[in-house]
């Protein structure tokens, strides 16, 4: 007969080991037990390190945050439950009724929705301007403008913002500059080095890199502002899942390898597509025919990133035929996966706009955005080339 525990309810102690695990442990605990009320008091007052309740912070989030901090050269960023949670934390910590926020006119769709719907309900005015044109940004500023939110490379037309010009302007006027660095990643650009006050990531995309974790990261240059952002995120409940943090940290080990390979593939694929008869236009930041080629070179050097946008002739019919002819490439509205994915902005990210609105941004029914992965580029060129031939045939 074996010894039976008196109750199954008590936790079994973790086995002792004189060796240690090499891999980061996964800690899903929601609560942390303290030794005494004095010890808990010391922890709450910051005199002793430790965790109390997972919404307020947990080890897997901190391990991941310290890694992204190092990549962005940030003092102490915060990992939150999604990229949009990062946008939310930054905005709700910094803004109040009566403020005005200026956004880039090609921001991520949900960030645009935040500006057009959520902030106005809170009494915060918003408007948009073209971030490639610093004069347009300046003209759109108001005395009550508190924050400018931009992305450096836009979705899906890959226009390159005048980051340095906007940072100078924001700095002169005492306006917070928030930069969503999801597309560019710290491999291509570190916004704090260009004068950003707040940097935001959808970690979901290239950083985690495997389409299996939804997370965000937000950091402020000013420690007091960072504290406010953290407090707001804890109150709003923007907490990340420990398991997602664990997956994302694992993903980061290969981030630089993945990024470099995907970028090399993207540059080669852009040149390949540009030479195909069925392709009306190719956009890639380091190509000389890119509308912001000079600024891309100045800001990003050779780092064109992993995104390529192209246009096939023949409208929606051609677009349907293209996707059907490339079943190996996931047709999915995301980016930054280790494998190549294809998206069609007119029916996904930009479906809320009118055809005229899309045309003004340079998006037609034939526009595709490719998030290039790490497959052999010859394979990608062959598969996409065949799909484009099928679409134009
Ligand atoms: C995906 C994305 C977001 C939102 O991130 P989630 O993790 O999906 O909430 C924000 N900004 C950009 C540029 C994105 O691509």
Image (tube, helix red, strand yellow):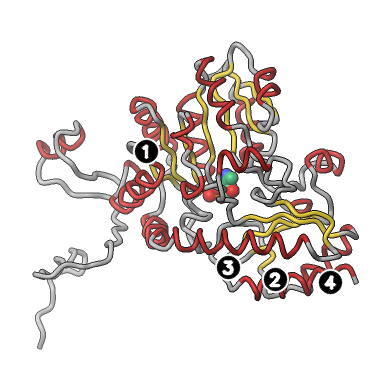
Residue behind mark 2: 381
Vertical arrangement, residue 168 with respect to residue 248, above or below: above
Neighbor class of circle 4 (other Cα within 10 Å; few <14, some 14-19, many 20+) is some
Q: Residue at x 78, y 74 (%)?
A: 386
Q: Where does the image place residue 119, in percent across and percent down from the top left?
A: 60, 28
Residue behind mark 1: 74
Residue behind mark 4: 389
Classify mark 3: helix, strand or loop.
loop
Q: Where does the image place residue 268, in percent across and percent down from the top left?
A: 65, 63
Distance, label 2 to label 4, CA atoms, is: 12 Å
Neighbor class of circle 1 (other Cα within 10 Å; few <14, some 14-19, many 20+) is many
Neighbor class of circle 3 (other Cα within 10 Å; few <14, some 14-19, many 20+) is some
Q: Residue at x 65, y 48 (%)?
A: 285
Task: Please identify, in this view, whether the residue under mark 2 or under mark 1 is nearer the observer.
Answer: 2
Q: Can you tell which mark lies on residue 216? A: none
Q: As drawn, which residue projects farthest toward the bottom?
A: 1
Q: Does residue 49 appear left or right of residue 138 in this picture?
A: left
**Image quarter in which the N terminus is found:** bottom left
Sequence-first tag of 2 and 1 = 1
Q: Does residue 346 appear left or right of residue 52 in this picture?
A: right
Classify mark 2: helix, strand or loop.
helix
Neighbor class of circle 2 (other Cα within 10 Å; few <14, some 14-19, many 20+) is some
Is the C-beta separation of discs 2 and 1 under 8 Å? Answer: no
Residue behind mark 3: 339
């Amino acid at each position: 007969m074996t010894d039976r525990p008196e109750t199954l309810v008590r936790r079994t102690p973790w086995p002792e080991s004189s060796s240690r695990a090499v891999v980061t442990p996964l800690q899903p605990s929601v609560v942390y037990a303290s030794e005494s009320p004095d010890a808990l008091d010391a922890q709450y007052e910051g005199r002793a390190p430790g965790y109390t309740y997972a919404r307020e912070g947990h080890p897997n989030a901190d391990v991941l945050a310290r890694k992204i901090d190092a990549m962005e050269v940030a003092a102490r960023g915060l990992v939150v439950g999604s990229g949009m949670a990062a946008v939310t934390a930054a905005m709700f910590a910094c803004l109040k009724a009566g403020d005005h926020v200026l956004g880039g006119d090609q921001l991520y769709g949900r960030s645009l929705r935040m500006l057009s719907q959520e902030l106005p309900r809170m009494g915060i005015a918003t408007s948009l301007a073209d971030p490639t044109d610093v004069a347009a940004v300046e003209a759109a500023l108001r005395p009550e403008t508190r924050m400018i939110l931009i992305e450096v490379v836009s979705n899906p037309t890959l226009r390159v913002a005048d980051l340095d010009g906007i940072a100078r302007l924001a700095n002169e006027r005492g306006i917070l500059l928030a930069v969503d660095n999801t597309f560019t990643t710290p491999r291509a650009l570190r916004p704090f080095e260009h004068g950003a006050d707040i940097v935001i990531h959808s970690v979901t995309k290239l950083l985690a890199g495997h389409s299996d974790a939804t997370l965000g990261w937000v950091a402020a240059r000013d420690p007091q502002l960072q504290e406010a952002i953290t407090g707001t995120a804890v109150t709003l409940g923007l907490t990340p899942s420990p398991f997602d943090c664990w997956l994302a940290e694992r993903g980061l080990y290969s981030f630089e390898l993945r990024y470099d390979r995907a970028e090399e593939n993207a540059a080669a694929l852009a040149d390949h597509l540009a030479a195909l008869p069925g392709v009306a236009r190719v956009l890639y930041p380091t190509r000389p025919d890119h509308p912001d080629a000079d600024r891309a070179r100045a800001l990003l050097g050779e780092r064109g990133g992993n995104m390529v946008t192209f246009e096939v002739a023949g409208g929606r019919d051609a677009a349907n035929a293209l996707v059907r002819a490339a079943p190996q490439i996931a047709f999915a509205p995301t980016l930054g996966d280790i494998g190549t994915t294809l998206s069609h902005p007119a029916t996904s990210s930009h479906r809320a706009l009118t055809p005229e609105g899309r045309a003004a941004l340079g998006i037609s029914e034939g526009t595709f955005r490719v998030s290039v992965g790490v497959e052999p580029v010859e394979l990608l060129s062959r598969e996409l080339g065949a799909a484009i031939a099928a679409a134009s045939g």
